Image: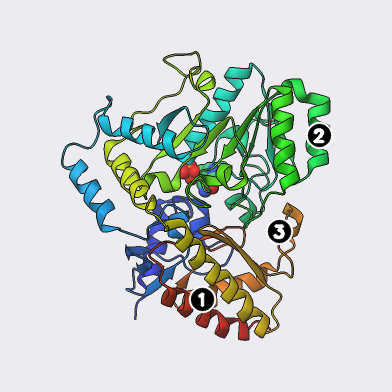
Amino acid sequence: MTDRNQELFDRAQRSIPGGVNSPVRAFRNVGGTPRFFARAQGSRLWDANGKEYIDYVGSWGPAILGHAHPDVIRAVQEKAALGLSFGAPTEIEVEMAETLCRLVPNLDMVRLVSSGTEATMSAIRLARGFTGRDAIVKFEGCYHGHADSLLVKAGSGLLTFGNPSSGGVPADFAKHTIVLPYNDVAALEEVFASRGGEIATVILEPVVGNMNLVMPSRAFLDALRALCTKHGSILIFDEVMTGFRVGPKGAQGLFGIDADLVTLGKVIGGGMPVGAFGGRREIMEKISPLGAVYQAGTLSGSPVAVAAGLETLRLISAPGFYENLAARTKQLTDGLAAAAKQHGVAFCAQAVGGMFGLYFTDARPSTYDQVMACDKARFNRFFHGMLDAGHYFAPASFEAGFVSAAHTEADVAATIAAADAVFATLG
Ligand code: PMP
């Protein structure tokens, strides 16, 4: 049988760099041929060969309801029929902004953009404009999209490619970015003690999903909030991944910490290109046309994209939604950990809301170095074993995974059974 995935990948590489439009898709880390997907429904994906997979990537987070939820598809189709974009205000974007301000803690005002990258890039500019300072603090292994000043020791594809930074980023830009180790309170205190008055903002993934999954310590979160307040720096929670994923109020709600600015993406677009950044009114009023900080977008607030996002937010507000999602995700991580133990494989896992981490090591990592020390070769064998058996995990050991509300108990049980057979070959 011809392998349509391979045919398409060969063809793609002639006209698209690396054959992909986003690097991690290329399977460089795990080797082999990327799957080209033709269709998705609920918890399932079908590739170009017609092979079916249970999906644990969920388009890297957006597909919290599962794929192609009928209500979301209907909302998109109805809006599309009325015109795709106007470059002028619409009622639905006001509804979206009101909904986000109601659901997300500490959001007085919000602006819509078309990706997570735009959200973080704009939030950083706003924090700099508001404070009149240049320096920003980020943490090693946190990925915030591909804006210049944030591509310093970033996670996700940059870890996969062993590339601490990126070509094309002037040293003059990167010098304003201070990179600290995640969960390191002493390093944070030290940098604020020496340079507190220069720091416009501290940005972090409040649960890191771009160096596998790393939880913040309580002491780290408390120190972040206290130091930013004391020194007049803006605390940005990058909730592009964690927003509506770790719980209904995101990481702010989960940990009871108030950020000054929050960035959102993924789930709020329900699979369409929507991002957002928002926060306290006095900060948000610095944005053009009210203030001097420029930010804009031809397709920002696209009515069709916003229709998908708004319908998604409506559906995930159903009572019990997050309890069920968290229970299903924990079923997966508990089941995988038990299967690995059975076969004597050094492995552990953890779930937070509908997000999970899998680690080929004995203890859950809480630092970048511990993540890097996990057994990548074993992960790659696990990944390919699961892929062959029809279970699609992220093609790199530095990525968190995602479960959707469409995953049934039987889906997850089938994945655990398949993993049991794969672990048996890894001991
Ligand atoms: N921030 C975080 C925490 C992310 O996980 C991502 C994407 N994985 C981004 C920002 C960038 O979002 P986008 O890919 O939509 O530009």
Q: Quadrant of the N terminus?
A: bottom left
Q: Residue at x 43, y 61 (%)?
A: 404
The span from disc 1 to disc 2 (Cα, nearest Å) is 43 Å
Q: Which of 343 and 45 is in front in this view?
A: 343
Amino acid marked by disc 3: Val
Task: Return the residue at label 2.
Answer: 189
Q: Which residue is drawn at 59% across and 18% down?
A: 130
- Give the structural element (helix, strand or loop) at label 2: helix
Q: In this view, does 235 lie above or below 284?
A: below
Residue 386 tag number = 1
The span from disc 3 to disc 2 (Cα, nearest Å) is 24 Å
The answer to which of marks 3 and 2 sits earlier in the sequence is 2
Task: Return the residue at label 3.
Answer: 371
The answer to which of marks 1 and 2 sits earlier in the sequence is 2
Query: x%, y% of residue 243?
Result: 50, 45
Amino acid marked by disc 2: Glu
Q: Which residue is drawn at 56% across and 85% down?
A: 421
Mark 3 or 2: the one toward you: 2
The answer to which of marks 1 and 3 sits earlier in the sequence is 3
Q: How crowded is mark 1: few (under 14 residues within 10 Å), some or many (20 or more)?
A: many
